[in-house]
Image (cartoon, rainbow, N blue to C red):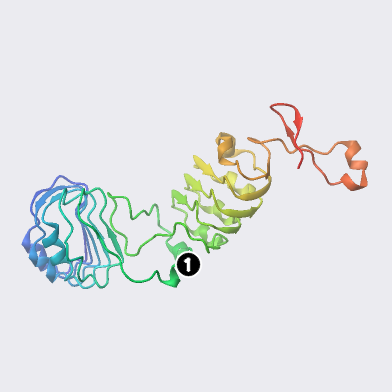
Amino acid sequence: MVHLSQLDLGLNQFRGKIPHSLSSCRELKTINLVKNSLNGQIPESFEHHQELTSLSLSKNSFGNILAALGVLQQCNNLTTLVLTNSFHGEEMPTYGIQGFESLEVFIIPNCGLSGSVGLSGSVPLWLRNWEIPESLTQLKSLIFLDVLHEDSTPPEFPFFMKSNQNASGLNRPEFGNLKYLHVLDLSKDYLTGAIPDGLSNMKNLEILDLSFNKLLGAVPSSLIELSFLSRFNIANNGLSGAIPSGGQFSTFPPSSFEGNTGLCGQHLYSCCIASKETETAPMERSRTVPVDLRFGIEVMP
């Protein structure tokens, strides 16, 4: 199979060493061997995989990380390397990690490694300009994506967007294109603007977390159409208005909405209709008085 481009053998019970004959498949771009019982060293013949872009060797019993890095650095197009939970108790090379000129993602947690990793140079200014790429909304068959999950096949591009202090990109109606997505977690991303109504088109969504952002405006009532939504969190934003009622919204706890001083409705204090007396007062004509139903106390706006 010399023209094979992707090889996914993850989550099996394969034992033994990686066969040297694999080097005959020189058009391989993705190799996933995660969660097997493979051992030994990475074959020197891996240097022939010049088309390889993504490699995951997680949760195996490979040894000699020095030799492995020495071989893999010669894969000139390698952009994603995942070594989670392998090479246990070994030491990182004292001379540093050489080569890997195309590497963008290097994941190596839970290995019990010793030694140190040194970083030099300055933090590039483009880091502060990260935002949610519009091209992401074109992945219409996307179900879940998490490059830190050790059991997942490495993606062809990195997806790190946390702590983005200049992001403003939640206002993308194109999010509705992701009809098969099950999990959307954009918490703590400094997002601004309103929650787009188009999220209601994500019919398979089970988890939606927009907490700890700077979102404003109302919670779209169309979100009650997300019948599979089991976890929803918009806490600690600047949202206002009535919380939608009906659908899955009746099952969400108060903690999903706290930290939004302008929100009212179920889970919080009620959005009461102004009394007749209040309606007759010119200055209070449009005012509604929220009441804390737990204690029967008026809550001043």
The answer to which of 93 and 262 lies nearer the viewer is 93
In the depicted structure, whether residue 159 falls above or below residue 58: below
Mark 1: give few (<14), some (14-19) or many (20+) Cα within 10 Å. few
Q: Residue at x 35, y 62 (%)?
A: 158
Q: Residue at x 67, y 44 (%)?
A: 261
Task: Give left or right: position of 212 versus 280.
Answer: left
The answer to which of 152 and 82 lies nearer the viewer is 82
Task: Give left or right: position of 158 versus 226.
Answer: left
Q: Disc 1 marks which residue?
A: 128
Asked where in the image residue 249 lies, by quadrant, the reply is top right
Q: How many marks?
A: 1
Residue 102 horizontal/vertical position (percent): 27, 72
Task: Give left or right: position of 225 versus 300.
Answer: left
Which quadrant does the N terminus fall into? bottom left
The answer to which of 230 and 131 lies nearer the viewer is 131
Is residue 1 among the parts visible in the rendering? Answer: no
Residue 111 horizontal/vertical position (percent): 21, 49
Residue 184 horizontal/vertical position (percent): 46, 51
Is residue 278 among the parts visible in the rendering? Answer: yes
| SS at mark 1 in the image | helix
Q: Residue at x 48, y 66 (%)?
A: 134
Residue 272 horizontal/vertical position (percent): 77, 37
Which quadrant does the C terminus fall into? top right
Look at label 1 and name its amino acid. Arg
Task: Give left or right: position of 24 versus 274.
Answer: left
In the depicted structure, whether residue 150 falls above or below residue 264: below
